[in-house]
Amino acid sequence: MIFTDAELHMMRVYARNYGLAEHTDLASTILMVAIMGGYMNRKHGPPPGPTVMWRGYARLQMRTIAL
C-alpha cells in the first residue's frame, strides 16, 4: 500500500543486481530503500536517519521513472 507496483519491481531488480536479499515484508522493503540511500546496515550501527531515507527514496523514484 505504501509502494507502487513499479517501485516494488524496481527494488526486486536492484536486489538481484547487487546480490541483496529480496524484500518479503515492509521492514525489509524500508531497509532496501535505506540501502539505496547509502545505509551500510552494520551490526552495531544506528538505524537509518531521515537524510538517508530521503536519498534512498529519491533514488528509487529516479530508477522507477527510468524503468
Image (tube, rainbow, N blue to C red):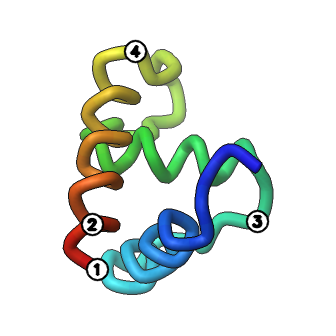
Q: Which residue is mark 3?
A: 24
Residue occupying the point 55% across, 44% down: 31
Q: Which residue is mark 1?
A: 67
Q: Give the distance between the C-alpha atoms of the residues marked 2 and 3, in whole angstroms.
A: 23 Å
Q: Give the distance between the C-alpha atoms of the residues marked 4 and 3, in whole angstroms.
A: 23 Å
Mark 2 or mark 3: whose residue is earlier in sequence: 3
Mark 4 or mark 3: whose residue is earlier in sequence: 3
**51 up-or-down from 23: above or below:** above
Asked if residue 35 lies left or right of residue 2, the reply is: left
- Work out which quarter of the rendered image holds the C terminus and state it: bottom left
Residue occupying the point 32% across, 76% down: 18
Q: Which residue is mark 2?
A: 65
Q: Amino acid at mark 3?
A: Thr
Element carrying mark 3: loop
Mark 1 or mark 3: whose residue is earlier in sequence: 3
Residue occupying the point 27% across, 66% down: 65
Picture coordinates of residue 42 (x, y %)? 44, 36
Picture coordinates of residue 66 (x, y %)? 20, 73
Q: Give the distance between the C-alpha atoms of the residues marked 1 and 2, in whole angstroms.
A: 5 Å
Mark 3 and mark 1 in contact (Cβ < 8 Å)? no
Element carrying mark 4: helix
Picture coordinates of residue 44 (x, y %)? 51, 24
